[in-house]
Image: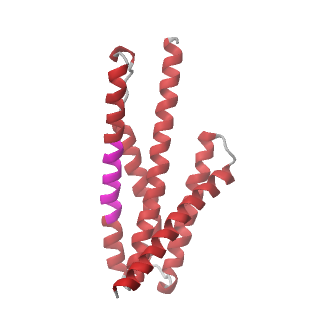
Amino acid sequence: MSTRNNLAMSKTTNNARLLKSAVLGANDGMITTFAVVAGVVGAGFKTDVILVLGIANLIADGLSMSLGDYLGERSAAMYRNLSVQKSSIKSYRVWESGVVTFVSFVIAGSLPLLPYLLMYLQFPLDPALSLKHSILATASGLFIVGSMRAIVTKNKWYRSGLEMLAVGSLAAAAAYILGTVIEQAIT
C-alpha cells in the first residue's frame, strides 16, 4: 500500500475512533446522569441534593470513562506496535479519545440536570414536572446525538436518531425499574 493510502486509512481509523468515543461518552453521560437524577428524585431529595449528586457523578464517571478509554486505546496501540514496525505508525495520539469521551460525557450528561439547574437558578419551572423535563431533555439529547452520527456514517438521520434514542431509553428504563425494585426491597 502506498504512503498516501496509509495516511488516508490512518485518518479514517482515527476519525472512526473519535466518533466512537464521542457517541459512547454522550450516551453514557446522559443515561448515567439520568439514572442518578431519577433515583435521587425517587428518594424525595431536594434540588440542591440532586445537583450535588448529579454533578459529582458527571465529573467522576466522565473522568473514569475517559481514563478507561485512554488506557484501552494505549493498550491497543501497544499491541499494534508489537506486530508493526514503528516506522509505519504515524503520530497516533491515544489521549484524543479520552478527551473526546470526557467532553461529550460532560456536555451531553448535563442535559438531565438542566431542569434542576434552572430551578436552582430561580427559573419559574414547576418542581412537580422537573423529572418529566429531565426525561424530555435526555430523550431529545439522545435523538440529536444519534442524528448527528448520520453526518459521518451517511445513514438516514432519523434512523440514527431513533436507534440511539431506543438504546438509551432501554438503558434508562432498566435503571429506573431496577431502582424502583431495589427501593421497594430495602424499605
Q: Nearer the viewer, residue 141 or 74?
A: 74
Q: Which region is colored magenta?
A: 57-70
Q: Which color scheme did the rendering employ for the protein? A: secondary structure
Q: Position of residue 14 (x, y in %)?
A: 46, 32
Residue 94 sits in which quadrant? top left
Kindly identify the residue that appears in the image at 31 percent across and 72 percent down.
52
Kindly identify the residue that appears in the image at 56 percent across and 70 percent down.
136
Q: Position of residue 4 (x, y in %)?
A: 52, 15
Q: Residue furthest bottom?
A: 187
Depicted 101 relative to depicted 3: above or below? below
Q: Is residue 2 left or right of residue 158?
A: left
Q: Is residue 58 magenta?
A: yes
State how many labels appear.
0
Inspect this view and state whether residue 120 appears.
Answer: no
Q: Is residue 42 magenta?
A: no
Residue 143 sits in which quadrant? bottom right
Depicted 148 relative to depicted 42: above or below? above
Residue 150 sits in which quadrant? top right
Q: Nearer the viewer, residue 34 or 118?
A: 34
Kindly identify the residue that appears in the image at 37 percent across and 26 percent down.
80
Q: Residue furthest front?
A: 185
Kindly identify the residue that appears in the image at 68 percent across and 54 percent down.
158
Depicted 30 relative to depicted 69: above or below? below
In the picture, which quadrant includes the C terminus? bottom left
Inspect this view and state whether residue 49 appears.
Answer: yes
Name the chief secondary structure element in magenta: helix
Q: Position of residue 57 (x, y in %)?
A: 33, 64
Q: Is residue 17 left or right of residue 156?
A: left
Q: Position of residue 109 (x, y in %)?
A: 43, 61
